[in-house]
Image: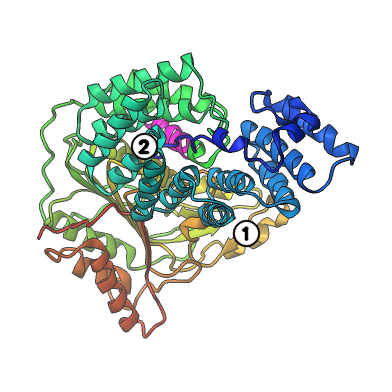
């Protein structure tokens, strides 16, 4: 992924402000209250002190705080939150709220983290450390302007804060300001050349600029530094730096066409234990990319010519399971690619008349505005999986990647699946193995150096209702109407910066297939997607208005965006 996990900065500056004096901390026991104590020993020592039931009030709050510090070193964020909650009940303090907010950040619960950092700021004087940590949470939410404002405050409080310069650079990069990002990250490297994290961030910038050799060099140096001197900051999630470094160097190797080294790095990244949300997201991407490069037999030519778009003429109707041929030229940086699939001729569940027409209409509209389109109609699972994986592999070097799917879709246990035409669910069969996991597509595309647009007209009904019901509760399978919102996707799902996801209707609702040749959503989409000079989110607003009018308020399209600025599919 593109997700750059960095240290939450120097909690050590807070350790002296934990809710007890230094003398009291010494009385409580040095193993429990010393930041250099190994995590297991710290947790064990603090647990024994709590079991004595001798201390109460502020002193007991201090013990809970230090046990939370030990759990934080281990990446056990549930225990961190449990202990900080108890410490806050006994004696609120900036240090405790900061630690709890940081744990919520590492879990990916950014709103709760922001609330904790707000509470920390209310309890004491302005703190550059807390501003920095809150900036991280705003950045996690995709609110880069607020993140930069907090990093500015942190840098004003401490002009030598390498991590604040680094993270402000990340936020600038997310807004498309590569020059500003590079300036800030270079300053972070000057302030502390021993830190591997700024080098990892600069790896992504070089890759965005197409300077892959520099990206690989920075990734290699980051790995060397992380191995020679593992991060000692107790707020850095365990193993997060190495996981990030190996994943980003692998992405650079893959973009260069060096699949052997990319595979090695992806394998190393996956072999490391991950505890935090960012590391798990990096590993989700590494897992998908590894499977793609493992299948690749020949490297992509680094200086291959730009692929040409297919002609706008309607494609020849295809047999079931046969994908339309796309341009044979490999993708290169700067190209715009689209994967378009329409499944309607289902053999064992309710057939849909319109998805094939929808896919052809959208594919034509995309070709007309310069996209290289891979198009598939009525694909069985093998063909759908192959076409999807081929697209993910080629899109690694594209500037814009767009995925459109029309057909049956279903959420099972809160995860979304796209359904091939040959799906046949029998009693005792593993349902999800017969379908295409949307999370896999999202993880394979998750990369901040590319714009990703995913459009799903895939919630027309739940064709699996009877099969899901007959599966019984022993498998913990729950089928629900429509598709799940991205926030409720599985833990391996990633929503990287630069991604827009659009559904034909709101999460959990059922879209209409339509009475004409196209569904209401796809008919509107194919009409508006080629409008010159229309920003993509404005385009979807027009689509939404048309669908609401056409369906008499029965269907309201929905979208979720973390795009990094304005994106125009059809040039101005």
Check the image and report above or below for 467 versus 68.
below
Task: State the image coordinates of residue 389 (x, y, percent, origin top left).
Answer: 35, 39
Please determine whether, in this image, residue 508 is positioned above or below residue 204: below
Q: Residue at x 33, y 26 (%)?
A: 189
Is residue 545 shown left or right of residue 334?
right
Q: Is residue 248 visible?
A: no
Q: Which residue is mark 2?
A: 159
Q: Which residues are magenta?
A: 281-292
The residue that appears at 52% across and 42% down in the rendered structure is 277
In space, the residues marked 1 and 2 are separated at their CA atoms by 52 Å
Which dot, 1 or 2, sits closer to the camera? 2
Dominant secondary structure of the residues highlighted in magenta in the image: helix
Question: Would you say residue 286 sits in the magenta stretch?
Answer: yes
> Mark 2 and mark 1 in contact (Cβ < 8 Å)?
no
- 461 or 114: which is nearer to us? 114
Of 172 and 318, the residue lying toward us: 172
Q: Is residue 211 visible?
A: yes
In the visual, does 324 lie left or right of 164?
Answer: left
Where is residue 176 drawn, in percent x and y?
24, 46
Depicted 20 relative to depicted 367: above or below: above
Residue at the disc numbered 1: 478
User: Label 1's element?
Assistant: loop
x and y percentages locating residue 206 in the rendered image? 24, 31
């Amino acid at each position: 992924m593109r997700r750059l996990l960095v240290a939450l900065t120097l909690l050590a500056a807070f350790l002296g402000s934990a809710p007890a004096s230094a003398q009291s901390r010494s009385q409580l026991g040095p193993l429990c209250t010393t930041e250099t104590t190994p995590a297991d020993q710290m947790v064990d020592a603090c647990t024994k002190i709590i079991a004595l039931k001798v201390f109460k009030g502020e002193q007991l709050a201090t013990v809970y705080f230090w046990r939370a510090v030990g759990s934080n070193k281990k990446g056990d964020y549930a225990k961190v939150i449990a202990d900080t909650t108890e410490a806050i009940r006994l004696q609120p303090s900036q240090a405790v709220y900061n630690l709890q907010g940081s744990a919520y950040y590492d879990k990916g619960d950014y709103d709760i983290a922001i609330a904790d950092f707000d509470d920390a700021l209310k309890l004491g004087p302005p703190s550059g450390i807390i501003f920095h940590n809150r900036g991280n949470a705003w950045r996690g939410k995709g609110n880069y302007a607020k993140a930069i404002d907090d990093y500015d405050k942190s840098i004003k409080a401490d002009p030598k804060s390498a991590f604040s310069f680094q993270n402000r650079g990340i936020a600038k990069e997310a807004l498309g300001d590569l020059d500003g990002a590079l300036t800030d990250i270079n300053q972070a490297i000057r302030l502390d050349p021993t830190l591997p994290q700024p080098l990892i961030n600069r790896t992504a910038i070089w890759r965005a600029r197409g300077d892959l050799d520099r990206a690989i060099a920075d990734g290699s140096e980051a790995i060397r530094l992380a191995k020679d001197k593992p991060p000692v900051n107790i707020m850095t999630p365990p193993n997060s730096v190495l996981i990030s470094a190996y994943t980003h160097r692998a992405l650079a190797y893959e973009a260069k066409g060096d699949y052997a080294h990319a595979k090695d790095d992806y394998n190393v990244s996956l072999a490391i234990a991950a505890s935090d949300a960012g590391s798990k997201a990096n590993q989700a991407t590494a897992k998908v990319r590894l499977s793609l490069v493992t299948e690749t037999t020949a490297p992509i030519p680094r200086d291959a010519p730009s692929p040409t778009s297919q002609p706008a003429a309607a494609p020849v109707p295809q047999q079931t399971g046969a994908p339309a041929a796309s341009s044979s030229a490999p993708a290169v940086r700067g190209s715009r690619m689209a994967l378009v699939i329409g499944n309607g001729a289902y053999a064992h569940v309710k057939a849909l008349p319109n998805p094939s027409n929808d896919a052809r209409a959208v594919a034509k509209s995309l070709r007309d505005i310069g996209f290289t389109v891979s198009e598939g109609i009525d694909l069985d699972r093998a063909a759908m999986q192959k076409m999807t994986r081929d697209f993910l592999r080629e899109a690694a070097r594209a500037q814009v990647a767009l995925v459109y799917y029309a057909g049956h879709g279903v959420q099972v246990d809160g995860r979304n699946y796209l359904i091939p035409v040959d799906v046949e669910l029998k009693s005792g069969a593993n349902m999800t193995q017969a379908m295409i996991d949307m999370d896999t597509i999202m993880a394979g595309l998750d990369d901040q150096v590319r714009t990703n647009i995913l459009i799903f007209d895939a919630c027309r009904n739940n064709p699996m209702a009877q099969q899901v019901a007959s599966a019984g509760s022993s498998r913990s399978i729950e089928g629900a109407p429509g598709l799940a919102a991205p926030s409720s996707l599985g833990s391996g799902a990633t929503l990287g910066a630069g991604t827009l996801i659009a559904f034909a209707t709101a999460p959990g609702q059922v879209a209409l297939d339509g009475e004409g040749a196209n569904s209401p959503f796809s008919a509107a989409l194919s009409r508006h997607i080629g409008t010159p000079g229309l920003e993509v989110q404005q385009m979807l607003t027009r689509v939404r208005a048309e669908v609401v009018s056409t369906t008499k308020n029965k269907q309201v399209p929905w979208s979720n965006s973390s795009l990094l600025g304005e994106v125009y599919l059809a040039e101005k």
